[in-house]
Amino acid sequence: MTSYVFRRPWVGQNYQPGGLLLLGESHYGTADEQNDALFTETLIRDYANRQWRHRYYTMIGSILTGRPGPDVDPFELWHSVAFHNYVPAFMPCVGVAPSGAQWIAGGEPFQAVLRDLSPGRVLVLGKRLWWAIETYSGIKVERTRPMKFDWGEWEVARLLAGSSSPICASWIRHPSRAKCSDWHEVCANFLGGAWEGARVFNA
């Protein structure tokens, strides 16, 4: 079985236990970058400091806040949350899905992140990843009755990860393809109201 370096999640300076963990699917890059344990931390820190831009991360900010990307303060937002990419392998390019073995390899690191950070909410950034958590992570998922919106159904679940308390989790469409207005409504329901800067959302 392929072994992977555990990449430390991004943890904003204002994040606290009970806060919001954003869960992405995977990074894209080279084999050398894949072995960098600080890759995720460095990536998000540089984005928060406006050293680079990417539509994926800009859309996350817009979906959470309901504001256009230029009106979102990346430093304030990203220092209010934690972020972890589930799949430990780097994908070679956009559109390549993880293999079953790569999904399975992400289970234990994800469980470790939940234990270490004790989030009150986990927002999963993609429907495929939402399905994979239940299928591959080793975490029991208790789903609730779906909520109906004009554009379709959406659901919340409780993650039962070992000895930790149940964690409220839900998903949005992958930010690269999501319509901001629709999915901001979902986030507002899930988080208990519109984003308010450094607010920590408790379960």
Image (cartoon, rainbow, N blue to C red):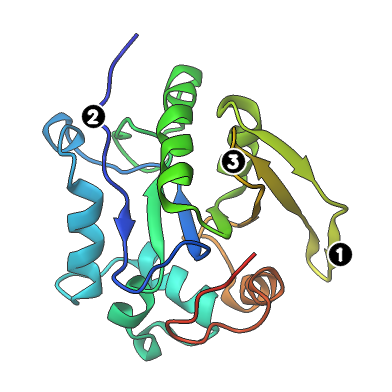
Left of 167 or right of it: where is 106? left
| Whole-percent x, y for residue 176 in the image | 46, 60
Name the outermost residue toward the bottom: 71
Along the line of sight, the residue nearer the viewer: 164 or 188:
164
Q: Are marks 1 and 3 in contact (CB under 8 Å)?
A: no
Q: Which residue is mark 1?
A: 148
Q: Which residue was labeled with disc 3?
A: 128
Res 1 quadrant in image:
top left
Characterize the local packing of mark 1: few (<14), some (14-19) or many (20 or more) Cα atoms within 10 angstroms: few
Mark 1–mark 3 Cα distance, whole angstroms, equals: 19 Å
Residue occupying the point 23% across, 55% down: 41
Is residue 33 visible in the rendered image? The answer is: yes
Q: Is residue 21 above or below residue 187?
A: above
Image spot of residue 183 (x, y percent): 63, 70
Residue type (three-letter) at the residue carrying disc 2: Val
In percent of width and height, residue 115 lies at: 46, 43
Q: Nearer the viewer, mark 1 or mark 2?
A: 2
Could you tell me which quadrant the C terminus lies in? bottom right
Alpha carbon distance from label 3 to label 2: 23 Å
The numbered dot on residue 13 is: none
The answer to whether marks 3 and 2 mark residues whose Cβ atoms lie closer than 8 Å is: no
Q: Which residue is mark 2?
A: 5
